Image (cartoon, rainbow, N blue to C red):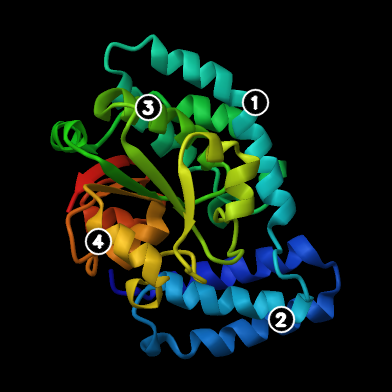
Amino acid sequence: MKVQLDCVQCNLRQALEAARLVTTDLDIQKTIVLKSLEVLLEYDSYRTSPEMGGAVHEVVKEYTGNADPYEKVKRVAIKIAHDMYPVLKRYVETQEDRLLSALEVSAVGNLLDAGVYGDMRTVDMEAVLNRELTKGFAVCDIKALREDLKNAETIVIIGDNAGETVLDRILISEIKNVSGEKVGVFYAVRGVPMINDATEEDAIASGLDHDATIVSTGSAVPGLILDEADPEFLKLYRDADVVISKGQGNYETLSDTAGRGLYFLLKAKCEVVARDIAVSVGANVLVRK
């Protein structure tokens, strides 16, 4: 999905928010904003918004000296999700269509996003998630997914935010109910800290290593650039029977370049992505492309 002008202001906002998470030094914050503007002036050189965002967040890391500015925010998000996990797990297990309900929980978990809320410690995320869970899907290709899962031996889920990895454990459990316990489920995370996206360390903190094999995409941006991905992951991605891509960043980088069929599971959190999928802002989406 080609980068849009709307993405410029969004990335600049994130740069300032990230700077404020790490330092109260106004001179450093000012430097980060001005250096980010220099990055954004190269707008035409970026294929997608996550690539531009990755460059902006490298500025934050460089001038704060902090390799993981969102570390505390991620811990908060994981704790929020852990606290809600038992309730949501029981909720899914009582539903007539457990796979659909698990997909809804996973999509709603996509809201545990510092790129949208900034410091989630200032937001009642539990209330947000409970409210959003009643929305259902605006686009839902579950029939095709269910059929693909029945015969699948290898499934790859490309993760997004750290907090939602906890709730994705519920989805993985329901996937295994459809595909069988012998199915191999691989959960792909970022290669380095990037905004509040999940790394291997975050996924382990979520307990996800008990439910799937955690692998790194090798990605250093808030998305997945296939021509920059780790070769071992790339082979796994290409050979998998089913690939489920979580979140907007992965949609923005893969929707035009996936090179295979895959399912996008996300909440459309901005006008740019919503317009591309032809849904309203805030809609939950499960779409096969």
Image quadrant assignment for residue 2: bottom left
Residue 287 appears left or right of 37: left
Q: Amino acid at mark 2?
A: Glu
Q: Amino acid at mark 1?
A: Asp
**Residue 135: which disc?**
none
Q: Earlier in the sequence, mark 2 or mark 1?
A: 2
Q: How many marks?
A: 4
Secondary element under disc 4, as helix, strand or loop, is helix
Location of mark 4 (residue):
238
Location of mark 1 (residue):
83
Q: Of tags 3 and 4, which is closer to the observer?
A: 4
Q: Earlier in the sequence, mark 3 or mark 4?
A: 3
Q: Quadrant of the N terminus?
A: bottom left
CB under 8 Å between callouts 1 and 3?
no
Q: Residue at x 42, y 35 (%)?
A: 106
Secondary element under disc 1, as helix, strand or loop, is helix
CB under 8 Å between callouts 3 and 4?
no
Q: Earlier in the sequence, mark 1 or mark 3?
A: 1
Q: Quadrant of the C terminus?
A: bottom left
Residue 160 appears left or right of 94: right
